[in-house]
Image (cartoon, rainbow, N blue to C red):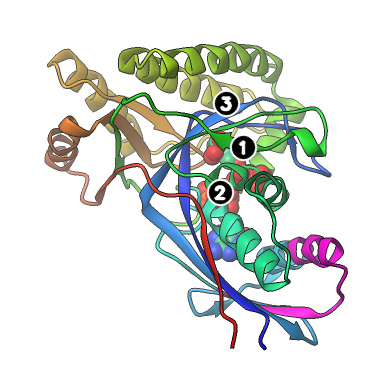
Amino acid sequence: MSERATAVAHSNIALIKYWGKRDEGIALPATSSVSLTLDAYSTRTTVEWGRDTDTAELDGAPLAGEAGARVTRFLDLVRSLAGRSDGASVISRNTVPTAAGLASSASGFAALAAAASSAAGLDLAPRELSILARKGSGSAARSIFGDLAVWFAGDDDASSFAEPVTDPGLDLAMVVAVVDAGVKTISSRAAMRLTAETSPYFPAWVDASRTDFTDMLAAIAASDFTRVGELTESNAMRMHASMLGATPPVSYWQPDSVRVLHLVRDLRSTGIECYATMDAGPNVKILCQRRRMESVRDAVTAAGITRVTTSLPGPGVAVSRDDE
Ligand code: ADP
Ligand code: DP6
Ligand code: CO
């Protein structure tokens, strides 16, 4: 019998961001976050144990350097949970652009956590899977779940996990203005570390985001789309403000990013309600309700952005063991 499993996970975009760790060793975040899993972007990963060494490939090319080392460190965690010492082969495909600020590390490590643990014979509950995925990439803790998810910062390894948030009928959708799908110049991990270590605005970001988080959960429970949108946009801007305060400053913005941010403001003034958020990359994600998704997409296209992706809420991770 082969010890092989395949998992599919979807990326997620935070409405309340995770930016900065309290403990980098076990990936405890400085603050709690809330996200929307997207059906448009995913990772499919197959893991097979019983090898002499670890090998990993993504989109047909070997994962080398830090990306390969990150997979091996993650497999070490699975080995220690499963009490085994063999190597694994990892074969992965992203439909999400890799390292472009569209959360490939979230879908990537959620899929790897599910495939590697299942293939190793572990039968982890969703919460345990979220805790494991978190140690590959923080945002991956949330991609275990579909739709809206909350990741509680927690105060130790066992209390820092994500879980689903009930959507009371917000009917959310996201339009992604793909300004640049290329690889970012500084990884999310390095940029958040630099911000936490050097930005005088980092403590203010942590304070503000804690309040935003509480307000966001209340706005979701009240099914108040306007409030959800306003909090989404202001929380993202606050995160980027904290980066600008780093030494050296971190900015992922490109001219087209700013153009889309202005367009979103203009659309609101004409009655098309939508709100922008940005992550560690130049692409702008526009949160709206499903009935406005096409109007928003058409407006972004008309503004000259050639790659525009529409997305509805996506599913949580799915895994199947290939027992032969
Ligand atoms: P993103 O905005 O795409 O999440 P990050 O800087 O957070 O960007 O992480 C990108 C890194 O995540 C990649 O360089 C790679 O190390 C890792 N990654 C992305 N996709 C996968 C995958 N399918 N399998 C394993 N690792 C992945
Ligand atoms: C801006 O989860 O990619 O997208 O934990 O170091 O792998 P690591 O970082 P990552 O950071 C995501 C940052 C963000 C905001 C968010 O997704 O909450
Ligand atoms: Co990431």
Q: Which residue is mark 2?
A: 144
Circles 2 and 1, Cβ within 8 Å, touching? The answer is: yes
Q: Callout 2 environment at 10 Å: few (<14), some (14 to 19), or many (20+)?
A: many
> Alpha carbon of mark 1 to alpha carbon of mark 3: how far?
28 Å
**Up-down: is 58 above or below 12?**
below
The answer to which of 305 and 22 lies nearer the viewer is: 22
Check the picture and name the quadrant holding the C terminus.
Answer: bottom right
Q: Which residue is mark 3?
A: 244
Residue 285 forms part of the magenta stretch: no
**Up-down: is 238 above or below 56?**
above
Magenta segment: 73-91
Classify residue 58 by image quadrant.
bottom right
Q: What percent of the width, then of the height, locates residue 212? A: 54, 14
> Alpha carbon of mark 2 to alpha carbon of mark 1: how far?
8 Å
**Of the image marks 3 and 2, the number of the one nearer the N terminus:** 2
**Up-down: is 209 above or below 314?**
above
**Of the image marks 1 and 3, the number of the one nearer the N terminus:** 1
Q: Callout 1 environment at 10 Å: few (<14), some (14 to 19), or many (20+)?
A: many
Q: Is residue 311 left or right of residue 321?
A: left
